[in-house]
Image: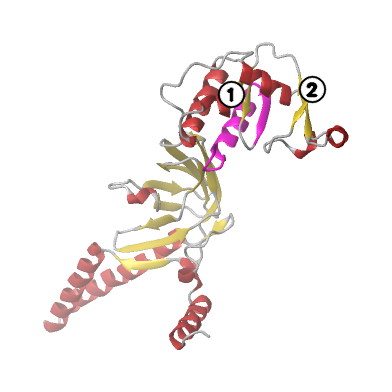
Amino acid sequence: MRSAPAARWSRFLALAERRLPALTRMKRVEPLPIVLHRRRIYVVPTRFGLAYSAMLIVMLLGALNYNNNPALLLTCLVGAATYQSIFSGFRTLNRLALRSLKARPCHAGDVLRVSLHFDSASLARRALRMRLEMSAQAAGAPAALFDLSADEGTTVDTELRAPARGWQTIGRIRVWTEFPFGLFHVWSWLHPDFRALVYPRPEANAPPLPAAGSESSAAAMRRSGDEFAMLRDYQTTDPRRLIAWKASARHDRLLVKEFERPQGQEIVLDWRATAGIDSEARLSRLTAWVLRAEATRVQYALVLPHVRVAAGIGSDHAQRCLRELALAPQAGT
């Protein structure tokens, strides 16, 4: 049974969800497109705005003290212009839409470049700033400054560090403006449901590519070929579809089929050929080999404990190999 404080806290959260959804859901991912509206836009005065407000109060007190009507009129006009600037800043963010995101592939340790496409909703917008929350953790991280025309949207490029391989989320995006006078800070948060794939970092001084026709290459080529070659004992890494059930019943042990094909100039980048180093270093070496084989235009196959990629060449083949390396289990053997 829950305690009374826990029950009160649950009721408070439920009330906050109903009354302040923009605050309580601020950290949840959202599907694209994301459109800003009045319930998720916030306004606070800047330091300059606070000092400016204090100056207006002094002007008002002086005009009232000396019964100076022109000074009082001037103070009221300046105050009205200041008040209207709040709506100008709010209007700059209202109905701003984030339509799409794209990320350029990168390797762990490099910079992940992300492109965000904003839509103006037929309204010109000036002096907008944007920054990824994750990149803002770095000291002095600059914000992207951009404008939007009324006729079309714009694409804003930003970047953040990609420390590890695998899926990289970009986190929340802060969008704000101090347009037109810098008196008020108007901001909102975007948290798109988006992630980018980061490839393993290639080994700096990787050994030469494995020679075509080596023992490990021949074994891998037999498994990925099309013509039946032989039967052998079952291993735990073998797929079930290769089990020869009839032959296994005759020999009272599990046997699997092996297939082969001519090797030609193909090479095999085999996980087992990188034994002796930790799993992440092995992935880095295989990544370097994939890039080198692609650069030298040599057909190559990739053999990992969890997947085998048939021999090929080209950007699509390289991306598939790099994807499998990026999504490899954390603890490989």
- Badge 2: residue crowd in 10 Å (few <14, some 14–19, many ≥20): few
Q: Residue furthest front?
A: 252
Q: Quadrant of the C terminus?
A: top right
Circle 1 SS class? strand
**In the rendered image, the vertical position of residue 60 relative to residue 103, given as above or below:** below
Where in the figure is residue 320, as x and y percent of width and height? 62, 32
Residue type for callout 2: Met
**Is residue 75 visible to the viewer in this orientation of the structure?**
yes
Is 26 included in the stretch rendered in magenta?
no
Q: Which residue is mark 2?
A: 230
In the rendered image, residue 39, in percent from the top left (x then y), is placed at 49, 70
Secondary element under disc 2, as helix, strand or loop, is: strand
Residue at mark 1: 269
* Amino acid type, residue under disc 1 in the picture: Leu
Q: Residue 251: image x %, image y %?
A: 84, 33
Q: Earlier in the sequence, mark 1 or mark 2?
A: 2
